[in-house]
Image (cartoon, helix red, strand yellow):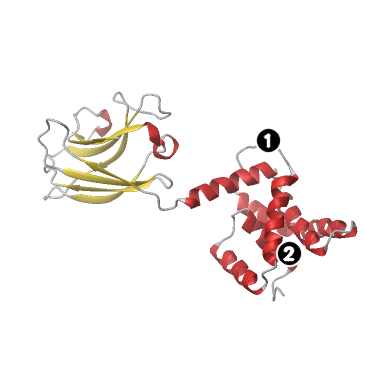
């Protein structure tokens, strides 16, 4: 039994699960349904197979509003989904397949090719598979350098979010700032300065030479991370930190 949930809602839940597109509330609802009705797992498995084998269209990037378009269009097209289900049953297939193909129709009615849907789902699964992947980079004084400062950059390439922690850097003179740079290979697909560097963040320190703050990372960390060659910190003019005129105070080659 599926309790108070309608067949149309169940179809959308099954389709959303296969597309990796359920909200936390929808996931909880489906989890309760599966606990009460283990045979629904067969529906999910067969729907997955149906989606993977139904079409073979050229792949293009799916629209950002996939979820809204899917749910709105499917909700407006229940009659068509039921018609598909009824026609399958009329051909002699089991009722379970009628429900499965009804869910398939509700998904495909949104006007997206199967390859689009599968591409989008694959990207979501890839991102979700390593949601907490982080890389910690410890920066120190370059060879021959006299700085006693230390810095640590923690990055998450999947989310392009990170943090910067600095200690023992000299206090800044008026009109100056510290700059964190991402230095990349010349072949990287990124906009860089004359030193093949990307200005990642500008920061100051307190009287003890310390700071700890979140940072946003340039897309190169996710797209071409293997081409990131170093992370460095310099001291620059506050009026034009992007000029990148100073040598690194702290650096870590990668």
The secondary element bearing badge 2 is classed as helix
Write down the residue under mark 1.
58
Quadrant of residue 98 within the rendered picture: bottom right
User: Residue 15: image x %, image y %?
Assistant: 67, 57
The secondary element bearing badge 1 is classed as loop
Residue 233 to residue 153: above or below: above
Q: Earlier in the sequence, mark 1 or mark 2?
A: 2
| Quadrant of the rendering where the N terminus is positioned | bottom right
Q: Residue at x 44, y 52 (%)?
A: 131
Write down the residue under mark 2.
8
Q: Residue at x 85, y 56 (%)?
A: 88
Q: Residue at x 70, y 73 (%)?
A: 2
| Quadrant of the rendering where the C terminus is positioned | top left
Q: Label 1: few (<14), some or many (≥20) within 10 Å?
A: few
Quadrant of residue 218 within the rendered picture: top left
Q: Which mark is residue 202?
A: none
Lateral position of residue 83 relative to residue 254, left or right: right
Lateral position of residue 84 relative to residue 188, left or right: right
Q: CA distance from mark 1 to mark 2?
A: 29 Å
Of labels 1 and 2, the one closer to you? 1
Q: Is residue 231 visible?
A: yes
Lateral position of residue 172 relative to residue 112, left or right: left
């Amino acid at each position: 039994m599926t309790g108070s949930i309608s067949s149309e809602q169940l179809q959308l839940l099954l389709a959303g699960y296969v597309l990796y597109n359920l909200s936390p509330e929808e996931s909880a609802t489906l989890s309760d349904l599966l606990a009460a009705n283990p045979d629904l797992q067969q529906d999910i498995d067969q729907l997955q197979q149906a989606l993977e084998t139904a079409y073979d269209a050229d792949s293009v990037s799916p629209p950002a509003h996939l979820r809204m378009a899917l749910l709105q269009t499917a909700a407006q097209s229940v009659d068509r989904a039921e018609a598909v289900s009824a026609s399958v049953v009329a051909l002699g297939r089991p009722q379970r397949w009628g429900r499965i193909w009804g869910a398939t129709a509700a998904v495909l009615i949104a006007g997206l090719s199967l390859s689009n849907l599968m591409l989008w789902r694959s990207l979501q699964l890839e991102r979700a598979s390593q949601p907490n992947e982080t890389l910690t980079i410890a920066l120190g004084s370059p060879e021959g350098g006299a700085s006693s400062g230390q810095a640590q950059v923690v990055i998450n390439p999947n989310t392009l979010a990170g943090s910067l922690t600095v200690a023992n850097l000299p206090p800044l003179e008026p009109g100056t700032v510290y700059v964190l740079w991402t230095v990349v290979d010349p072949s990287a697909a990124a906009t860089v300065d004359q030193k093949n560097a990307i200005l990642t963040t500008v920061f100051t320190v307190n009287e003890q030479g310390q700071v700890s703050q979140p940072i946003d990372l340039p897309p190169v960390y996710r797209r071409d991370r293997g081409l990131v060659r170093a992370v460095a910190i310099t001291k620059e003019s506050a009026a034009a930190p992007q000029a990148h005129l100073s040598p690194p105070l702290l650096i870590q080659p990668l």
